[in-house]
Image: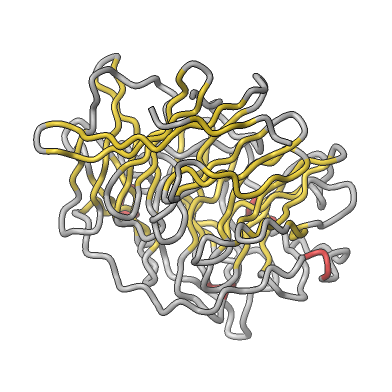
Amino acid sequence: MTACAIEPSAGHEDDEDEDGSRPAGCALTADGAYGARLASAGDSWFPERWTLDGHEPYAVPLPRNQPEEPGTEVQPMGDGRVLIHRVVAGRHAFALLYPTGPGTGELPLGAVECRDGTARLRLLPPAPGGERAYALAVGPRTTSVWLVAGGAFGPERLAELPGRCSGGVWLDRTARLLALDRESGGRVKTVVVDLECGEVSPLLQIAAESDDRLLLADHDSGLLIVRSDAPSPGQGRLGWGVLGSTLPVRFPECLRVRDCSLTPFAIQPGQVLTPESCAVALRVDGPRGSWVGVWRPAERRVHHLRAPEGWLAGTGLWTPEGVLRLPYATEAVPCGVARVCPPPAVVPESGVATAPLPEPEPAAPPAEHSVRPAEASAQSAEPPAPSAPRPVPLQEAPLGRLVTN
């Protein structure tokens, strides 16, 4: 059993996640209506809510009586409140913050105490719907999924898995199916947890000796973005597949950029029947800083675009029309959204490209005209929700035929 217990109502994370990726500077609700981050004023830190679904984005500071610790987690809820996760005397305390005229209101939700001093607890990515929030408690031998906001009686443990888990990707619109990367027997494989019944099933197992992680999933098309060392043992590579498909996972060469690390952070929605046409936004970290990459499986090349000044790196959201919206903050514009319109896909008349297109090495972020900072526009209406796909284990597909083009 996981050594965590509920406390009545009354942390600091590493700079990198366990898979080597860096956490985003801001969390966004699944629909992009709100954002939340920990902002600084001199040496002090305080939560800040961003409203992004109007004609002009704006930020609302939510300070309390004393500054927050630098590693405090915050997450926006669908109703505009902000969930805050603090570590107090070894307990993980949760509360909802909201503006009250000139001040900040706080609604305590309870706490989770991990009696094992080596256990870690962190918030999972914002869930679809924005009504609930979840956390992952990772111990030395087991991992628990907790409902920490939106329940009836405070924090509630929903599922417990053997092994140490990381990641966290929602596979449906109801926040029922959660994909986690589980370490067991010295290898990492992605599993699916059904939070209604606690059932755990395998999802991503490319090769017996490979480490396979799920990074992103799109609810509309079923497109999955993975990182695995199956094609290059000891070196994690980005690849893509489709949930429920019988085709193998593919690892395009264009996603290997010399002296740079690529971290996907958003998939274009609305491409229900054409997952290969979905645009994927990438955070590119290189020797000269960070910038934005855009890649589509059908085109199989990466467009490198200059990020706006003050970009909250690793944060962004696609519109169904293919516009990438990137939150940024500067001294002149403390709350802004840049609209990025990447070049349209260039696909041969015969269909999907069969070989990588020529691509120069990105010595530095490219031309500035690629990004148009602008006021946030009203969100486009979301397409009707399709039925949730069944999480068919990808290892049932013929994944021995690894495609690397």
Where does the image place residue 191, in percent across and percent down from the top left?
72, 54
Q: In which image quadrant can residue 86 be found?
A: top left
- Name the quarter where the N terminus is drawn: top right
Where does the image place residue 91, in percent across and percent down from the top left?
51, 24
Most distant residue in the bottom direction = 350
Question: In the displayed structure, would residue 188 be above or below residue 399?
Answer: above
In this view, the residue in front, 79 or 148, is 148
In this rendering, position of residue 212 left or right of residue 24: right
Question: In the displayed structure, would residue 341 be above or below residue 305?
Answer: below
Question: In the displayed structure, would residue 172 be above or below residue 310?
Answer: below
In this rendering, position of residue 241 left or right of residue 365: right
Where does the image place residue 239, in percent across and percent down from the top left?
68, 57
In this view, the residue in front, 297 or 68, is 68
- Tell me which residue sits at (14%, 38%) in the image: 100
In this view, the residue in front, 328 or 349, is 328
- Tell me which residue sits at (48%, 56%) in the image: 266
Residue 146 appears anywhere in the view: yes
Where does the image place residue 391, in percent across and percent down from the top left?
69, 68
- Tell me which residue sits at (82%, 57%) in the image: 206
In this view, the residue in front, 207 or 127, is 127
- Name the quarter where the C terminus is drawn: bottom right
